[in-house]
Image (spheres, rainbow, N blue to C red):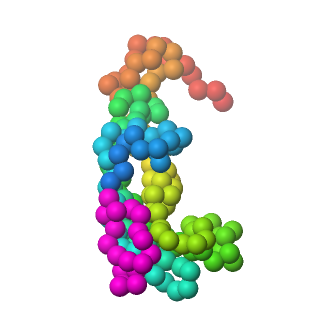
Amino acid sequence: MLRVDIRALRQGPVATTGQLPPDDPVWQDLALDLRDPVRVTGTLQASGREAYYWQGEIRGTVHGECRRCLSEVVSEFVVPVHAIFSSDPATADDPEVYPLPQPVTAIDLTPAVREEVGLAVPAYPVCRDDCAGLCPRCGRDLNQGPCACAQVPEAI
C-alpha cells in the first residue's frame, strides 16, 4: 500500500508496505536495470497541519555494467527514507518537501520512492574498487593479468 487515504491517519500512524515491479512506469527515464520488484516498508503519520511524515526503507537489486571492465555488476540497495509531504503553499519551493495537491485525499509515496532509488543507485557502477579496467589498445581485461601490448612510457 503505497497510496494512503488520509482518513486512515486519523487513527494514528499507518504502516506502508508494497512493491513496485521493474516495469512500473515510475522507473521510466531513470535508466535502471531492475529485474526484481522494489520492496517498500515504512510508517506514515500526520505531523502537523497539512503535513505528513513518512519513515521507511526501500530495498531492491539493480543490474549494470562495470564502467571500467564492462563485466556485469549486480548490486543490492537498501535506502532509508525520511520524507515530508505537505499541502502548505509555504513549502512548495522546499526541495526537502513533497508537495500535495489540494484537496488532499490521499498521499502517494511513489514519487519519494522514485527519487530515493534514483539517488541511491550509482550512475557508473564498478565491479570492485580496484578494478583495473580494459587495456585501451587491445581491450584485454586487465583484472585477469597484464596484456601483451608494449608498455608506453609515461609523459613527463
Residue drawn at x 44%, y 75% as measured from the top left: 6
On the rendered structure, is 131 left or right of 50?
left
Residue 79 to residue 128: above or below:
below
Report x, y in % for residue 78.
Answer: 35, 58
On the rendered structure, is 154 left or right of 25?
right
Question: Looking at the rendering, which quadrant does residue 65 occupy?
Answer: top left
Residue 14 within the segment the image draws in magenta: yes
Which quarter of the image is occupied by the N terminus?
bottom left
On the rendered structure, is 31 left or right of 36?
right
Residue 44 to residue 142: above or below:
below
Q: Which residues are magenta?
A: 1-18
Residue 53 to residue 155: above or below:
below
Q: Nearer the viewer, residue 119 or 151?
A: 119
Q: In this view of the protein, can residue 96 be seen by the observer?
A: no
Which quarter of the image is occupied by the C terminus?
top right
Residue drawn at x 50%, y 58% as measured from the top left: 111
Residue 114 to residue 13: above or below:
above
Q: Nearer the viewer, residue 5 or 31?
A: 5
Report x, y in % for residue 141.
Answer: 38, 23
Report x, y in % for residue 89.
Answer: 68, 75
Residue 111 within the segment the image draws in magenta: no
Residue drawn at x 40%, y 84% as measured from the top left: 10
Report x, y in % for residue 74.
Answer: 33, 40
Q: In this view of the protein, can residue 139 be seen by the observer?
A: yes
